[in-house]
Image (cartoon, coloured by chain):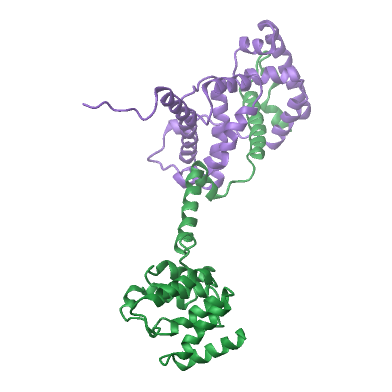
Chain colours: A purple, B green
Amino acid sequence: MTTAIPLYSPSARVMLEKEELEHKNFGLSEARFEKMLDDLEHGDEALFERIFVSQFWRRVRLLQSTHRAPQADAEDAVMNALLEFRKLLIARKVTWGNLEAYFTRIIVTGYQKKQKRTREISVDTFSDALAEENDLPDFSTEELAAFKKAWDSLCEKCSAVLKGFYYDELPHQRIADLLGKRVDAVKQDKHRCIEKLRKHFFEYL
Amino acid sequence: MSILKNQYNRQELPADDLSTRERQLLDTHLDRERAARWRQLAGKPEPVFSVAVQPRKWLWWAVAATFVLGICWFSGIFTGSNAGMGNQMAVRTDLVNYPFESASVRGERNDRASVRSTKAVEAYNRGDFRSALQFSSLEDHFFVGMCCLQMKDAARALPEFEKAINMPENIGAEIYYYKGIALQDLGRNTEARAAFQQILDSKSTRPFYKKAVTERLEQLK
């Protein structure tokens, strides 16, 4: 009775498995992934951009080939997926393990959702749920321009607090930790910054 | 502008919080900023081919290398068997060439032709003497000698001619013509003259050989 000789030593196998896992996670090790999440919370998006934004055109092409998506739609779908993925990462709703598959799923789901919305709905297939889908309203150019001016006029502290709370959806405690302040100080800052933002916004509107 | 302001009734806006519309506006603004920045970072789209190639670059290099090697193999660069690729040499015009097709040197036995391959003869006739040597048999001394002589390798040709002459069935004198040329190439003029004289003395030597020999002897004076 002969014993099978393993092709790889145990340590080599571990290394191979590790490489395979990193390959599924855009080449990110688990440690580097955690670092990326911390950076995102601190407002540093460099690593995120290097890893994910570099995938943009490849994902566009994949969507075009697998779903016959027109280029413009594919670009929108991938860009929206990037924005959504960033928010999910900050909210720590995505774990390291199979980021590539997760990201692809977000792209495809987003694209299919949009396709469903733009398809003509017949009386037979009309659905209340479809009608009540939560879409962002269309903002006028003047509104967006006024908001941009108002936002740009905020100080760094205000934009960090408001972005952290409303855009990144971080809790007060986390924002306080990131800014090195107490929670009640952060709440007061938020109140003051909202007032400033509104004041400027109405000036420019 | 008043229409827009009506959408934001300041009286109804919460003091410590952004309204739903304000939050949506903030989201849209920051999303657009990011999207614009990322579009710029992403640059131009990659060519379709590079997208396909990227994940398996090493594979494409392997395919390209195999393709190049295959072309080199078929063109005979490794085996040196392609006469059209620089193996061809200029046929010497200072001697009576020997086509090896239908004629044979007087004195050569007929069965000697069975040792000589068609490939070897074809290579010789197109001037690819190196390949002719490769395809020839080591026993075919006269043929080997002729190839060497054409390549101006008299030192190698001479022993081959001597072996051919020493074969009991080879009694013709015309081989001496080529032996004489080999000796002459080596600067052994006295021996060359002796070899040429044997041709002149032989009754079986064809006229064009005698004429060629006479010219050679003139040179050696």
Q: Place residue A76 in its image quadrant.
A: top right
Q: Place residue A1 in its image quadrant.
A: top left
Q: Looking at the rendering, in which quadrant would you find the C terminus of chain B?
A: bottom right
**Residue B174 shows in the view:** yes
Q: Camera-side residue: A130 or A24?
A: A24
Q: What percent of the width, then of the height, locates residue B15?
A: 68, 14
Left/right of residue A3 with respect to residue B181 in the rendered view: left
Q: Camera-side residue: B4 or B53?
A: B53
Q: What percent of the width, then of the height, locates residue B145?
A: 46, 73
**Residue B123 shows in the view:** no
Q: Is A184 placed above or below A130 here?
A: above
Q: Looking at the image, which residue sits at the far left?
A: A1
Q: What percent of the width, then of the height, locates residue A198?
A: 73, 21
Q: Looking at the rendering, in which quadrant would you find the N terminus of chain B?
A: top right
- The residue shown at (68%, 22%) is B9
- The residue shown at (56%, 78%) is B184
Q: What percent of the width, then of the height, locates residue B5?
A: 71, 28
